[in-house]
Image (cartoon, coloured by chain):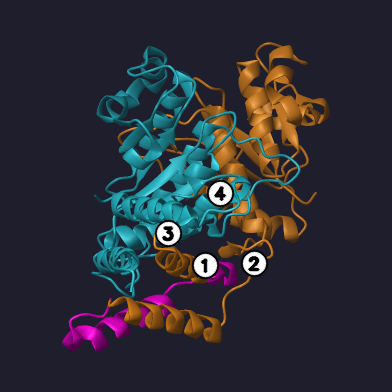
Chain colours: A cyan, B orange
Amino acid sequence: MSQPVFVLVRPQMGENIGGAARAMWNFGLDRMRLVAPRDGWPNQRAVALASGAGRLLDEAVLAEDTAGALEDCTFVFATTARARGLTKPVVTPERAMEMAREKIAAGERVAVLFGPERAGLENDDIAKANAIINVPVNPEFASLNLAQCVLLTAYEWRRGAVDVEPERMEMAGADWASQVEIEKLADHYEGRLEEAGFFFPETKAEGMKLVLRNFWSRMAMTRSDVQMLHGILRQMVRWKERGD
Amino acid sequence: MSQPVFVLVRPQMGENIGGAARAMWNFGLDRMRLVAPRDGWPNQRAVALASGAGRLLDEAVLAEDTAGALEDCTFVFATTARARGLTKPVVTPERAMEMAREKIAAGERVAVLFGPERAGLENDDIAKANAIINVPVNPEFASLNLAQCVLLTAYEWRRGAVDVEPERMEMAGADWASQVEIEKLADHYEGRLEEAGFFFPETKAEGMKLVLRNFWSRMAMTRSDVQMLHGILRQMVRWKERGD
């Protein structure tokens, strides 16, 4: 993979999916994934609006949920106007695409999440991301639509792709955990901690779970980190069961 | 004048004029001029599409021809996909807006010409410009529309004009854990995991402890992350002690 994947999460209007495809292909990006498009798939309005970029729609990978669309990805950006209190690095499109180039050069698989037109990404989606992309719009007037947000991000990809030499990364060659591995780790902890009575009181349980999921996805973890964390939890359960 | 004027030359669809106004105001630009809009002026479709940026349309200066719109300008850019054999400097949007900032700071009045949707600027218009802006699109697929071209140019104006931090952490009251807090966390886990029999076999115990300590210190953790991790461990111990 030599370019980031753009993931449209629960897009509503076919027109905007087509517009996003055009925006991507204008800047040489052609890997699109779609999470649960509202009006089903394929979508004739999307095809009509994509005109010369229809191939992106034919090749788009469909997923049922955001986790499914990110399974093989090791680094995920979420585009959102507000970080909503989740602790994440917030970067400009410029810095994000610079990071994407560095990570891709180091063998990582990078995705960018774009939310539905009206409401944007939900906290559950954002919690899966490693960093947030925030376009530096006029604070008095922020009205970027989906295709425009895709356009600016794709533009930054191409603008930097030409002359920027990928930095040497510390830990280059590390075997980074994939999104599905992080997801399994989060599930493992959430399940056991539920049994253990960690999520208490019940009124705070959902918030605590979100914070914990956000924590796992924010960390840059290798596969062996993830194995170690599974091992820690399994051993605590064994200890409990031994009852010594 | 502290910003460039954007001049829409013979725009056809009111929707696109409204879209261009929104694109400008997203990045803090509000000086629009219009040369002979096809459907007359004012235009209700433009107003409907401009939504929150309607003020730009109210204040837009109307001109009969391109020369009329440029009367007070000292430096003019023309946006076009092809230079069509005219000898002009051709610059990227980034470089153009950098030049615009320098010239405006030196007291010049700068304009950017955008052509009609279908055909783009005519040679007569381009001949009035000092330089050409060329967006570095995919040579296999160049399909930027008027509002998108305005958007990218306005974005470059703001990107260079506003001092945006390349990367900031969204912390909202949380702060980073100190070394001593990380150390205590590492001790807590090491101690309990020792009791739980995690460091096994004994020949590997030292290595496992080192890996675990390295893991904690590598993570960028807030104090509330650290509290959560202490809480997880304490709860696992409580669960064990309850013996249910």
| Label 3: element kind | helix
| Dot 2 alpha-carbon crowd within 10 angstroms: few under 14, some 14 to 19, many 20 or more | few
Instruction: Look at label 4 and name its amino acid.
Output: Ala
Helix or strand or loop: what does disc 1 sit on?
Answer: helix
Q: Amino acid at mark 1?
A: Gly
Q: CA distance from mark 1 to mark 2?
A: 17 Å
| Same chain shared by disc 2 and disc 4 | no
Viewer-nearest of discs 4 and 3: 4
Kindly identify which residue carries mark 3: A216
Relative image position of residue A89 (x, y in whole percent) = 53, 61
| Amino acid type of the residue tagged 2 in the rendering | Ala
Magenta residues span B198-227
How far, Cα to Cα, is label 2 from label 4? 20 Å
Q: Nearer the viewer, residue A129 or B205?
A: B205
Residue pictured at 69% horizontal, 14% vertical: B45
Q: Give the mark nearest the N terminus, 4 or 3.
A: 4
The three-letter code of the residue at mark 3 reads: Trp
Along the horizontal axis of the image, is A199 left or right of A56?
right
Chain holding disc 3: A
Q: Which residue is mark 4?
A: A205
Q: In this rendering, do the residues under marks 1 and 2 share a single chain? A: yes
Foreground of the two, B241 or A174? B241
For the residues bearing labels 2 and 4, Cβ distance under 8 angstroms: no
Q: Using the image, name the chain to which the residue with label 1 belongs.
A: B
**Chain ID, mark 4:** A
Please determine whether, in this image, residue B153 is positioned above or below residue B102. above
Q: Which residue is mark 2?
A: B174
Q: Residues within 10 Å of mark 4 (few under 14, many from 20)?
A: some
Q: Which residue in the protein does label 1 denote?
A: B231
